[in-house]
Amino acid sequence: MKKIEEFNWRKFLKPDWRKLSVFIIFVIFSSLIEEGNPFFTFISPTSYCNSYGFPFLFYTHCYREYKSIIIRDTVQPYFIPLVLNLIIWYLVSSLIFCFYDKFRGRKK
């Protein structure tokens, strides 16, 4: 009977070039995801508000425009959602390579 291996958390969380490269790609692409706020635009058609980030929004940019001149520009970065996004994407990249290494090892 085969001995069941314990899960090695150190190996799972240890950074290597594969995990870091996939992590950076995930962070870049998730930072480019833009969520507009149509309700805010409906109330004031000359105001625009966009939020960035996935799965948690960590950056908001709002501005009000009058005759192509920006009257009020507000930028709000959020630290906690950014940290949560970084943790989630690192865990996802680690999970991808954990499964990849496990299934690659079975085929040999």
Image (spheres, rainbow, N blue to C red):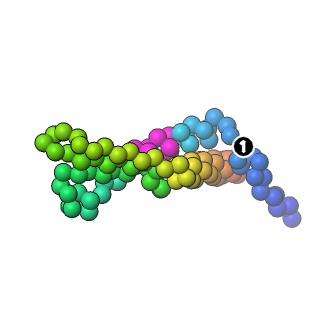
Q: Is residue 69 above or below residue 55?
A: above
Judged from the image, the secondary structure of the residue bearing numbered disc 1 is loop
Residue on which disc 1 sits: 14
> Looking at the image, which is closer to me, 97 or 40?
40
Left or right of 4? Residue 39 is left
**Amino acid marked by disc 1:** Lys
Residue shown at the point (50%, 44%) measured from the top left: 26
Instruction: State the extent of the magenta-drawn residues as a range.
Output: 25-34
> Looking at the image, which is closer to me, 46 or 4?
46
Q: Residue 97, how many percent across, how many down? A: 63, 47
Magenta segment, principal secondary structure? helix
Q: Is residue 46 visible?
A: yes
Q: Is residue 55 above or below residue 21?
A: below
Residue shown at the point (18%, 51%) measured from the top left: 46
Residue projecting furthest to the bottom? 1
Q: Residue 49, how many percent across, how many down? A: 30, 52
Q: Residue 79, how many percent across, how many down? A: 53, 49
Residue shown at the point (47%, 56%) measured from the top left: 55
> Is-magenta flag for residue 47?
no
